[in-house]
Image (cartoon, rainbow, N blue to C red):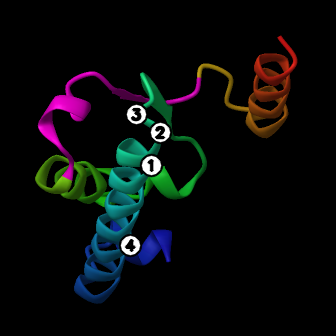
Amino acid sequence: MRERLEAGDSQVTALVRQAGQYFGYALTNLLHLYNPDVIVVGGSTSKYKGYMEAAKAALEEHALPELLKCCNLTEPKVHNRVIAFGAREWIRKLTQ
């Protein structure tokens, strides 16, 4: 799929953009429900050409501007073992 995307296959490009758009809707829901300061997006899917652009466009179109300006969308600083680090931080916050 990645090869077809990089080759400019219009069907795959449209599919990736649609998936990114739906991810942007999910990010909008996350922002509205929890109002986080930071949303960290990792994983290989976010690296697909056009995916995050579509996600960010959907987020900017549908999110409340007041919440969006207070939230930073970023990549993880540690690319391997991201899940383990995220779980560790979540548990640490819950037990404080």
Disc number for residue 34: 2
Secondary structure found at label 4: helix
Q: Do the numbered discs 2 and 3 sit on residues whose CB atoms are within 8 Å? A: yes
Mark sitting earlier along the chain (3/1): 1
Q: Is residue 16 above or below residue 36?
A: below
Q: Which residue is labeled 3 in the image?
A: 35
Near mark 4 (Cα within 10 A), the count class, few <14, some 14-19 or many ≥20, is some
Q: Nearer the viewer, mark 2 or mark 1?
A: 2
**Is-magenta flag for residue 94?**
no
Q: Is residue 46 above or below residue 7?
A: above
Residue 56's x, y, as percent?
Answer: 25, 48
Q: Which residue is labeled 4 in the image?
A: 19
In this picture, residue 61 sits left or right of residue 53: left
Residues 63 and 1: in front is 63
The picture quadrant where one finds residue 83 is top right
The picture quadrant where one finds residue 12 is bottom left
Q: How many marks?
A: 4
Secondary structure found at label 2: helix
Q: Which kind of residue does numbered mark 1 sit on? A: Leu
Residue 76's x, y, as percent?
Answer: 58, 27
Residues 53 and 13: in front is 53
Q: Residue furthest bottom?
A: 11
Q: Which residue is labeled 1 in the image?
A: 30
Say which quadrant the C terminus sits in.
Answer: top right
Secondary structure found at label 1: helix
